[in-house]
Image: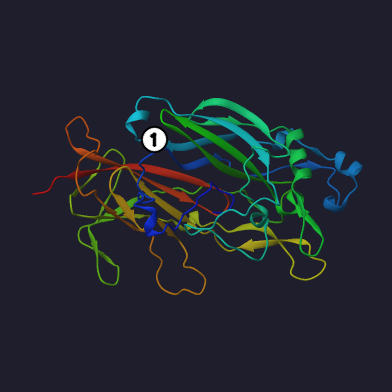
Amino acid sequence: MKRAGLLLLLGLAPACGNFADPSTVVDLRVLAVETDPSEVVLKVNGLPADPLNASLATLEAITIDPASIPTIHLTPLVLDPRPAAAGVPITYSLTACPNDPYGAAPPAGGGGNVDPSGGAHTTVGSTLCDGARVSWPLGDHIPADGPHDVTLTPAQLLQAFQTDIYLDQYGRPHGGFDLGLPINLELTITSGAGTTVAIKRVLFWAQPLPGQKVNVIPTIPQIVTYPDRTEDWAPLGTQGTLDAGTPAHVPLGGQLWLQPILLDAERESYVTTVIERDPPYLAVPDVVAHERIRYAFYTTAGHFDPARTVSELAPGVTGTVHLESRYVPPSSLDGVRTDASGAAVADVWIVVRDDRGGESWVQRQIVVDPGP
């Protein structure tokens, strides 16, 4: 995904053994990291017409208005269902660093964007903050069960802008000043049974682009359910909704389709920048008609098929977009969590992401009945 948390889907050979379905949470997992806001437009004073080619003295004269730097509310969605982690608080340490334009490219997958035309996301790497030329520790042992406020200083952001500079294939410099600056937020998460690392990115713009509006985080207003589909994939059977506090029931050997509802307002039009294909290869504004919205499905018991859906078909593919995923319960109730009444409960999360780092999620429950 563009400027969002890392997602790597590995194709494994059969000889490697049996691995859990990617939608099934069996150990320490970071399912999402929400940052609000997910995109920031700053007020940079003294910005020269061509900052990437300006002298060092000119760059040092640039200042950032502190009033334009918002507090970012960071909230991770972290799970560890293993017995060894039971009752142990999950915490994380947070480090920030500027994007490394020469770092490894982020993995594509899960409906992620691949845009050869340019734009800020094409400079974003997967390099961790550990060992980065510039990094800033922002806190240790932060509880993962609530938001954490992050506020970068003008000096840090100015240093980041001056760090994120690279030469394109024509020898012209580009980076944060003209393509947007991705700041990497590295979370090192620790539970009672392990440690993992996640990267979340927030995009900072030095100044507003013509007609630019900051990103609005997508949401999931409703989840529609139905027991089956026809041969042409139309809903079949009685439809319902999966609401918070009211679990759905699925028997062993059964199934349930979950369809997140996508409102037109969630697919925002937005302005970004791309590098011209012809000389002088400047970064110019580009209007994207609407964002690509992606969904990821997770559960603690059973699995989802498919694990990812997206609001647009792949380039060159025709057909109908399907956002729904099929919940398949486990083969038995052994090891499935039970509630106070003794019912076997599968916790379910659906994460929604957009093109500009906005993401949120909903949590629901499905009771797996033993059947006749």
In front of the other: 12 or 219: 12
Report the residue at 73% width, 49% height from top: 176
Q: Position of residue 160 (x, y in %)?
A: 74, 41
Looking at the picture, does residue 26 appear above or below residue 102? above
Report the residue at 50% width, 75% height from top: 316
- Which residue in the structure is indicated by mark 1? 80
Q: Position of residue 355 (x, y in %)?
A: 55, 54
Looking at the picture, does residue 98 appear above or below residue 103? above
Type of the residue with mark 1: Asp
Looking at the picture, does residue 246 appear above or below residue 146? below
Report the residue at 67% width, 59% height from top: 119
- For residue 98, side relative to residue 372 (left or right): right
Q: How is the image coloured?
A: rainbow
**Rendered-image quadrant of the N terminus:** bottom right
Q: Position of residue 299 (x, y in %)?
A: 33, 45
Report the residue at 37% width, 29% height from top: 85
In front of the other: 313 or 14: 14
